[in-house]
Image (cartoon, rainbow, N blue to C red):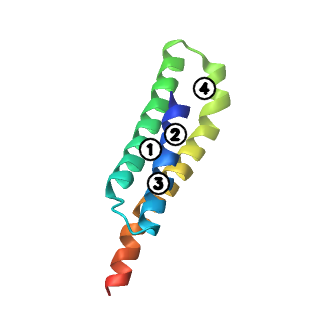
Amino acid sequence: MWLLLGLIAITATCINLYMYGSGKDYKLAMAMGLSFTALTVVADYRMVSDWVKAEDWAALLDVVPTMEAALWILTILSILLNVTPILLELKNKK
């Protein structure tokens, strides 16, 4: 599930940037990109929760340290990419 949500978040972010570049209203795509990013993080958390409930310590030890760093980096990148059009509009208004 997290993979599907992540792919939707990436697609929505690309649509956001494309719509901004073509001069169209991009705010819905921006909201979708950020929302699906949040849903991806929650889905990952759910997966880890399932591993804890199943006491699958090997999966936790193998995946969580790497996944934690990747989630931070990808979430920050998603926020920056989705907010870029707003920042560029503010810069152009000055």
Q: Which residue is mark 3?
A: 15
- Could you tell me the amino acid type at mark 1? Thr
Residue 78 shows in the view = no
Return the mark for residue 76.
none
Is the residue marked by circle 2 packed among few (<14), some (14-19), or many (20+) residues within 10 Å? many
Of label 4 and label 2, which has the lower sequence position? 2
**Mark 4 to mark 3 CA distance (whole Å):** 34 Å
Instruction: Identify the secondary structure beneath mark 4.
Output: helix
The residues bearing labels 2 and 3 have C-alpha atoms spaced at a distance of: 14 Å
Of the residues shown, which amino acid type is indicated by label 4?
Leu
Q: Which residue is mark 1?
A: 37
Q: Regarding mark 1 in the picture, which secondary structure is present there?
A: helix
In the orientation shown, which residue stands out farthest toward the bottom? 94
Query: Do callouts 2 and 3 mark residues in contact (Cβ within 8 Å)?
Result: no
The x and y percentages for residue 5 are: 48, 35
x, y percentage for residue 45?
A: 46, 31
Q: Are marks 3 and 1 in contact (CB under 8 Å)?
A: no
* Residue marked by disc 2: 6
Q: Amino acid at mark 2?
A: Gly
Amino acid type, mark 3: Ile
Q: Find residue 60 and name its label.
A: 4
Say whether residue 32 is left or right of residue 70. Answer: left
Q: Of circles 4 and 2, which is in front?
A: 2
Q: Position of residue 16 (x, y in %)?
A: 43, 57
The answer to whether mark 4 and mark 2 are in CB contact below 8 A is no
Q: Are marks 1 and 2 in contact (CB under 8 Å)?
A: no
